[in-house]
Amino acid sequence: MKKHLIRAVLYLLGIVVLAFGIVLNTKASLGVSSIITISYSIAHIWNLNFANTSLVMYSSFVIIEIILRGIRKEKREFWLSILQIPFSIVFTRFMNIFDNMLPDFKTAYDGAFWGSIGGRFVVLLAAILLTGWGVVLTVNPRLVPNPADGIVHTISECIGKSMGLTKNIFDISCVAITCILCLIANGKIIGVGIGTIASMLLIGRVIAITNHFVKTPMEQAMGLTKANTKTTNKYNNQEHVMNTSLNPSSIRSKKEITNALLKLMQDHSYSEISVKQIVLETPLERKTFYNNFSSKDDVLDAIISNAIHEYVVALTSSPGGPLSVIFEFCDKNRELLGLLHKNNLLYLLLLKLNKVIPELNCSLDMDGNPFAQMIGDLDPDYLIAFNIGAIWNIIFKWVDRGMTDSPDEIKATLEEYLKRINP
């Protein structure tokens, strides 16, 4: 409960800080941040309330998001987009309060330092800092995004480009629309200036630097993640480091990415699949992919590693013996084996086994070692390699024949053969 309260408080604080930063930016009269140039210029040309004009603009962003999410049939993200409407109402009410409270520094302090270019530039830098901190506080709790970020996120997923590139394009588009609108309706440009350029260049840096110092402790305080710990697994004679993060979002993202790759491998050659295709099969953005995996090969390695981990756990706990575990594993993982075979990638499974099984043998005592009776006091290296190669080549042959033969029949055939050569 305490962590949920911290999450809510930080999020609400972020809304206030972000609204204050955006409005303070406008009061410097050096050019406003790119996304709100449209609502700012419309409000000034037609003498409208700035906050209410921003509410209409944010609502239009949400409508576009809803249409795009509906086309992509993303129900969860669809409802998340709907929630941006009440966010916009609350957010713009704070903007309205600050807009009425803060003075226009150029006119209110005319002839004083705060009314000069230098003074207003200090105000602009303060606004940029507050805007960046507001973004950090509203984004890191992972609740409802503000519509400006939401529309950029949605477009980036639809076009398959990074969020950074999409935001740059969106920012430039907003400024271009503002300039055209102002020239047509007013004959001069309003709201675009050095402050606009400074905001485009510096807000992202403020966010990155702030997150470098506060993102991890913030997420831990909100209960969104736990510190990575090093777990020494008993089947490794060296330190076996695993990422034991319990971050539900990260776990869900990894699951969506691995499932997407497996789905694509059903219809496409593995060599032809790109990271872009994988991302487009998920509701995630490209940045999220690279937060969890370094490449397409890394995703496949994670899939194989997870399967091998299940196999090793069963091997050390099942009373049925190695053969029973192997065939149960293969029967359970028919789809994965078939996809690896279709793409000539079964050798990756063998390479992983050749690393894991010797480590398992070294780490276990004789009572818990499934290979103890077979190896005895003999040199285990060659015998383990022999067993892995022999058994798994049989499995690969089974896969090659379409996995139509019953695993129980193959097991019975092997057991009978072993009896004949060792009567």
Image: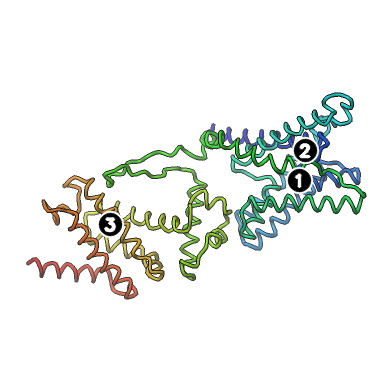
Q: Earlier in the sequence, mark 1 or mark 3?
A: 1
Q: How many angstroms separate mark 1 from mark 2 (CA)? A: 20 Å
- The residue tagged 2 is 93
Residue 34's tag is: 1
| Closer to the eye: label 2 or 3 | 3
| Other residues around mark 3 within 10 Å, as few (<14) / some (14–19) / many (≥20) | some
Above-or-below relation of 413 to 384? below
Do callouts 2 and 3 mark residues in contact (Cβ within 8 Å)? no
Residue 354's tag is: 3
In percent of the image, x 50 and y 56: which residue is there? 256
Q: Earlier in the sequence, mark 1 or mark 2?
A: 1
Q: Secondary structure at mark 2?
A: helix
32 or 317: nearer the viewer: 32
| Closer to the eye: label 1 or 2 | 1
Q: Earlier in the sequence, mark 2 or mark 3?
A: 2
| Residue 136, position as x, y percentages in the image | 63, 38
